[in-house]
Image: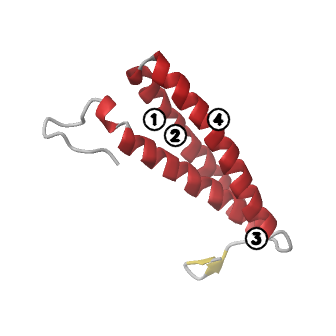
Amino acid sequence: MAIEGRVIPTREMSQELTRDVHASEHELTTLEDSIYQLIGDTLSVLLKQADTSWKAYRQLECDAIRLTFAQGSIAPVAQLQCWIELTDDRRRFLSDVYDFARPSQSAAGGRRP
């Protein structure tokens, strides 16, 4: 991968993506915690069960991506990119679906990303 004319070594890409994974996980966890507080115990239990299944899916999906590229040095990068994409997709999905349960940011009722 090249950025601004510089080739970035796979190890450096992996380190940067690992930081992005942690940031993405933190954003998802923060959103989930705010949703759990607003939707009540019964729905929280169901959502937590769904989250457990989703995490298993994410693990399998990203493991498959890594295996696809197992012969090359890009395998861990592909796996980390998969992890970030699926985590961000989950955060956007939950944000959209459970937006009604969270207080609006503005009096105009603006939506959150």
N-term mark: 2 or 4: 2
Amino acid carrying label 4: it is: Thr
Write down the quadrant of residue 85 in the picture: bottom right
Amino acid carrying label 3: it is: Ile
**Disc number for residue 52:** 4
Task: Determine the secondary structure under disc 2.
Answer: helix
The residue lying toward the viewer, choosing from 8 and 104, is 104
Amino acid carrying label 2: it is: Leu
Q: Are marks 1 and 2 in contact (CB under 8 Å)?
A: yes
| Residue marked by disc 3 | 74
- Rendered position, 102 above or below 80: above
Q: Are marks 2 and 3 in contact (CB under 8 Å)?
A: no
Residue at x-position 24% and y-position 36%: 105
Tell me the CA gap for discs 2 and 3: 26 Å
| Residue marked by disc 2 | 28
N-term mark: 2 or 3: 2
Amino acid carrying label 1: it is: Leu
| Residue marked by disc 1 | 31
